[in-house]
Image (tube, helix red, strand yellow):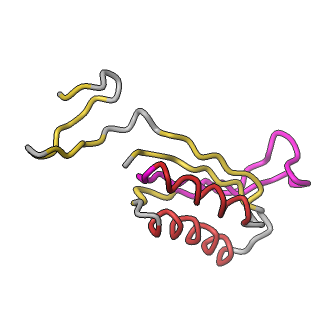
Amino acid sequence: MKAYEVMLLIDPSLDEEALTAVVDKTTGVITSQGGAVDSSENWGKRRLAYEVDKLTDGDYTVIQFHAAPAAIAELDRVLHLTDPVARYMIVRRYDLHYTRTTACGPHPVSREAGMRL
């Protein structure tokens, strides 16, 4: 599985319960596709540099997770159809350290060198 990060820009007029439901829906899609959520961080409401869908403020949430590349297409489809999400960005994280399992056991891998340590 590869490391990813998704940043959600959610409509700030939602109450706390609806905001939690949107984040839970996103993490649910990740886990249903065989991924694992590492962390979820709510950055809170922030003023936007320019209007996005007639919004001047937005509620930011960042989710870091590991998933197979095939799961990203499903996550992209679901976020595109979710109305409270004004914008989102899914980024592949090359800087995160992970382990690759082989027949001899897990080996730490350096992403910069692409070799075993």
- Compared to 25, does 97 lie above or below? above
- Compared to 76, does 101 lie above or below? above
- Identify the residue at image location x=58%, y=60%: 74
- Residue 17 lies in what quarter of the image? bottom right
Q: Position of residue 34 (x, y in %)?
A: 40, 63
- Compared to 99, does 27 lie above or below? below
Residue that protrudes farthest toward the bottom in the picture: 17
Q: Is residue 1 magenta?
A: no
- Compared to 31, does 107 lie above or below? above
Please state the total of marks drawn on the protein image. 0
- The answer to whether residue 49 is left or right of residue 17 is right
Q: Over which residues does the magenta segment extend?
A: 41-68
- The answer to whether residue 11 is left or right of residue 35 is right
Closest to the observer: 77 or 66?
77
Residue that protrudes farthest toward the left in the picture: 104
Which quadrant: the C terminus? Answer: top left
Q: Position of residue 82 (x, y in %)?
A: 72, 66
- The answer to whether residue 62 is left or right of residue 95 is right
Q: Position of residue 81 (x, y in %)?
A: 73, 64
- Identify the residue at image location x=30%, y=21%: 113
Q: Position of residue 33 (x, y in %)?
A: 46, 64
Q: Is residue 59 magenta?
A: yes
Closest to the observer: 54 or 33?
33
- Residue 42 lies in what quarter of the image? bottom right
Chief SS of the magenta region? strand
Closest to the observer: 53 or 81?
81
